[in-house]
Amino acid sequence: MDVVFESENILYVRPSFDLIPDYLEMVNDIDHVARFIGERREPYTEEEERSYIQGKLDQHAAMFSMLERDTRQFIGNLEFMNYKDDEAEWGIVMTHKMQDKGYGTEALQRSVEYGFSELGLRRIYLVVYADNLRAIHVYEKCGFREYDRNDVDVFMEIVNKSGKPASGSV
């Protein structure tokens, strides 16, 4: 797998059919992962995941799988979605066993830098469940600010006003 960009502990690669078993283990973990990424509660099949990955590849989506640098162990996926002019929505999903190790913070910081410097984005925004306090704390720590909320979601953004990579980036 070709590395698109990297950070201290993470390699960011294009989605791969070789990682489908890892993707399925992650998205089908209802208790620890799936409940934070959508409403679906039925397991995804290999065929559904293969079709999903093929669609992302066909669209040349700005989606990246994260691998631990030293072990090449799968960490999760992140993506820049819903492009409009110089803005995009950012999303991440991580396997339960790779959470609470600092990878989420590192991935957020480095991918924001990548979005600003390589993708030419001026604004990156995200939506997080209001009860996902741990994630909200990480987003705030990395420079995201809340700009709206409702009973279910918190809407956050980071804006690159200088034209340079975001401060605090890895």
Image (cartoon, helix red, strand yellow):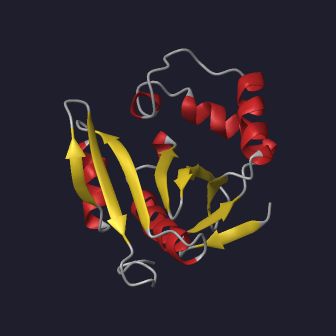
Vertical position of residue 25 compared to residue 95: above or below? above
Task: Identify which residue, 2 or 160, lies in the foreground.
Answer: 160
Vertical position of residue 31 compared to residue 118: above or below? above
Horizontal side, residue 138 vs residue 58: left or right:
left
Q: Residue at x 26, y 51 (%)?
A: 136
Task: Identify which residue, 86 or 44, lies in the foreground.
Answer: 86
Count numbered badges in the picture.
0
Quick check: can you spot residue 5?
yes
Vertical position of residue 158 compared to residue 57: above or below? below
Q: Give the position of the C terminus as an image quadrant.
A: bottom left
Q: Give the position of the N terminus as an image quadrant.
A: bottom right
**Residue 130 image position (x, y, % from top left):** 23, 38
**Res 66 quadrant in image:** bottom right
Horizontal side, residue 165 vs residue 154: left or right:
right
**Residue 120 image position (x, y, % from top left):** 56, 73
Residue most extreme to the front: 85
Quick check: can you spot residue 102?
no
Horizontal side, residue 151 vs residue 25: left or right:
left
Task: Identify which residue, 99 or 5, lies in the foreground.
Answer: 5
Q: Residue at x 74, y 53 (%)?
A: 60
Q: Residue at x 46, y 40 (%)?
A: 96
Residue most extreme to the top: 42
